[in-house]
Amino acid sequence: MSDKMRWRYGDTNPVVAAVDSATVIEIGDLVYQDVDDAKPASSQADQGSETANQESFADKFLGVAMQRSRAGDTSPIRLATTGVFEFDCPSGTAELGDLMGVDGNAAGTALLNQQVAKVSASEHAIGRVARRLASAATSVLIDVRSTVM
């Protein structure tokens, strides 16, 4: 997916995180902390199921990329650890406060960098719905909260 500024409003409480030179991060990617480096959701090793992948990611959720890092770049990037962001999601409705986590691919073997889905447990969540979706929609505003910060 290409760069997409997903921030809509609210304090972002930015941090600057290191990125390995081989890691590619796009603006708008959901990012986790792997030891001492930031990595996009799709880089996380498969945990065996979508819910296990979501829980593992949520435990290490660092934030949303506000800068890109191309292959070969070694400069740290800025990440938003809080704020309201608009992400793609599977078509559906949502109520204020619904829990949202990173969505998985169709096979359930990897996470998507810039897509979220409803989750049923807080340990799988990276944020909550910030604007009600009364009719089916394919994007949602969520208030994200880094679990690392």
Image (cartoon, rainbow, N blue to C red):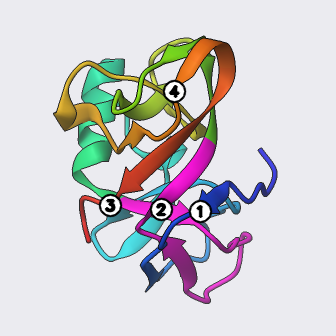
Q: Which residue is mark 2?
A: 83
| Disc 4 from disc 2: Cα separation | 17 Å
Q: Amino acid at mark 3?
A: Ser
The tag earlier along the polypeptide, 4 or 2, is: 2
Q: Residue at x 32, y 61 (%)?
A: 146
Q: Is residue 91 above or below residue 69?
A: above
In the image, is residue 1 part of the stretch drawn in magenta? no
4 or 3: mark nearer the eye: 4
The tag earlier along the polypeptide, 1 or 3, is: 1
Nearest to the observer: residue 123 or residue 77: 123
The secondary element bearing badge 2 is classed as strand
Q: Which residue is mark 3?
A: 146
| Disc 2 from disc 1: Cα separation | 6 Å
Disc assigned to residue 132 = 4
Q: Residues within 10 Å of mark 2 (few under 14, many from 20)?
A: many
Q: Total label count?
A: 4
